[in-house]
Image (spheres, grey):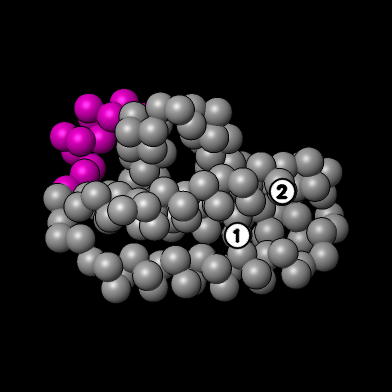
Amino acid sequence: MDWDICKKEHIREVSTDKDKIESILKMCSVRLNFAKKQEINDETASLITENYYEIIKELLTALLLKNGLKSGNHECLISYFKKNYPNYEYEANIIYELKNMRNRINYDGFFIEKQYLIKNKMEFEHIIELLIRLTKEV
């Protein structure tokens, strides 16, 4: 979604809440540890993939919150990242693709093949580490 549309229709200014950001970071850490411990097979690949998306989405939420913004629209979270961190366009595109996969899982009952997750797991974890770092930067 275009950032200007997001800004106009889905983004609002809020007070920066450091406690909430820390809580989000902690929950993401718990989710990530859980995801890493799961055996990847044809039955679990979709759930683990969905979990990676949830972690990334929550980290994007924390990143916006750090900058005094809030959005309930997932595409606007990605749009914000792409607009404000142009050096990470590749990562933004991976997040967008992951969002589409997550939507197929949630709304269509789609099952991810385990090879998709095995192939992309390191990318997802790289993006998670990047978002944590960006969120913690002063």
| Residue found at x 68% / y 59% | 48
What is the total number of numbered labels drawn onto the structure image? 2
| Residue found at x 48% / y 31% | 88
Quickly name the residue at label 2.
121
**Over which residues does the magenta segment extend?**
1-12
Residue 9 counted in the magenta span: yes
Comparing 20 with 78, the one in front is 20
Q: Position of residue 72 (x, y in %)?
A: 31, 52
Residue 108 visible in the shown view: no
Cα–Cα span, label 2 and label 1: 11 Å
What amino acid type should be assigned to the residue bearing mark 2? Lys
Q: Quadrant of the N terminus?
A: top left
Under circle 2, the secondary element is helix
Quickly name the residue at label 1.
51
Q: Position of residue 130 (x, y in %)?
A: 51, 47
Comparing 29 with 134, the one in front is 134
In this picture, residue 134 sits left or right of residue 126: left
| Residue found at x 55% / y 68% | 29
User: Upstream in the sequence, badge 2 or badge 1?
Assistant: 1
